[in-house]
Amino acid sequence: MKVYARLRVGLLLLAGVILVGITGFHYLEAWPWLDSLYMTLITLTTVGYGEVHPLSPTGRVFTSFLLVIGVSVEVFTLGVLTQAMLEFELGAFLGRRRMERELGKISDHYIICGAGRVGRSVARELRARPAPVVIIEKEPAHAQWAIDEGIPVIIGAGTTEEVLRRARIEYAKGLVAAVTSDADNLYIVLTARGLCPELKIIARVSEEEAIPKLLRAGATHVFSPYQYVGHRIAQCFLRPNVLRFIDAAITGSGGEREDVQIEEVQITEKSHLVGKTLAQSDLRKIAGVMVVGLKHLDGAMSFNPSPESVIRSGDFVIAIGRAESLKKLESLAAG
């Protein structure tokens, strides 16, 4: 039986002993209910205050049994309670140590500053990939969500270099500034950019006027939840089928073809696709995907590239296809 189940049993037994004591004194000695309660409590706690009223021989026998049984139940309950407290403290300690070990060797991860609604949504999406995530949150109540989800969390402010270094920002693939204050997000971006000049930083903003400030501070991209929601509402009216298709391809929901996805795959130098044109690679036939874009290392983006477009090492191929087809494309891109 688990410790918490034993604790529940102990508390129920203790409550039962108290109830039996009150009832026994009331009916055997004809005492008032309050006097019976008082006598039961001083008997079980062994404080030695003396009898409330003189006890009859039957009452003395009952009190003796009540004392022996009650003390036994109390010892059992106290022992289980002590064990539960020790297990709780030990579990919390071991959890912190395990989290510290995870943080000590984590790399290629994403740091999320803020475990509010936006931060939690980003964490869920990244972990679904799956991708390693570290959360920085200064509010213990919000940090508890990350702990419950098994996500490494640092309780502190992402505006400080110390906290960002504890999150191993120098080994991270990206950072999200998703706290509710635009000013705090600005400080997070400035601090993170100073520590890692090449890091990809995405910031959340509440006021549109703060967008250029965050971009100047070093944010790679800035998003406004309110602007995004307004855009989607408008698209639901203007292009409902396009929106449904994109939702189905990106999130796997909202469309009739939920097996279709949009993915980006980077071409490595080992891939035999390097140096070939899209026509020569014949990805549609070999992998079963449709290439809708090419992102080159110089930042140039080709939408609906022509068959003569050359695939280079480091390019990102943006393609639409089923999950198994996209996995074939990943294998071809990795060589």
Image: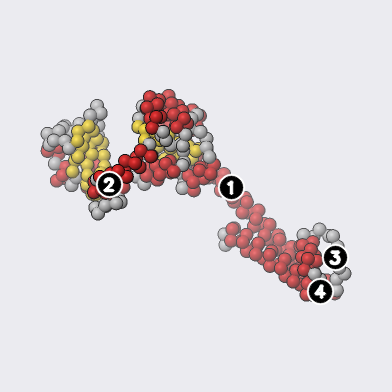
Q: CA distance from mark 4 to mark 2?
A: 80 Å
Q: Which residue is mark 3?
A: 51
Q: Earlier in the sequence, mark 4 or mark 1?
A: 4
Secondary structure under the numbered disc 2 in the rendered image: helix
Q: Which residue is mark 2?
A: 237
Q: Report the side of 195 relative to 39 (left or right).
A: left
Q: Earlier in the sequence, mark 3 or mark 1?
A: 3
- In the image, what residue type sits under mark 4? Ala
| Residue 202, image quadrant | top left
Q: Report the side of 160 relative to 126 (left or right).
A: right
Q: Earlier in the sequence, mark 3 or mark 4?
A: 4
Q: CA distance from mark 2 to mark 3?
A: 82 Å
Q: Which residue is mark 1?
A: 90
Name the spot of residue 159 as percent of width and height, x first: 48, 30
Q: Report the side of 57 relative to 253 (left or right).
A: right
Q: Which residue is mark 4?
A: 30
Q: Is residue 212 above or below residue 90?
A: above
For the question of whether residue 19 can be seen, the reply is yes
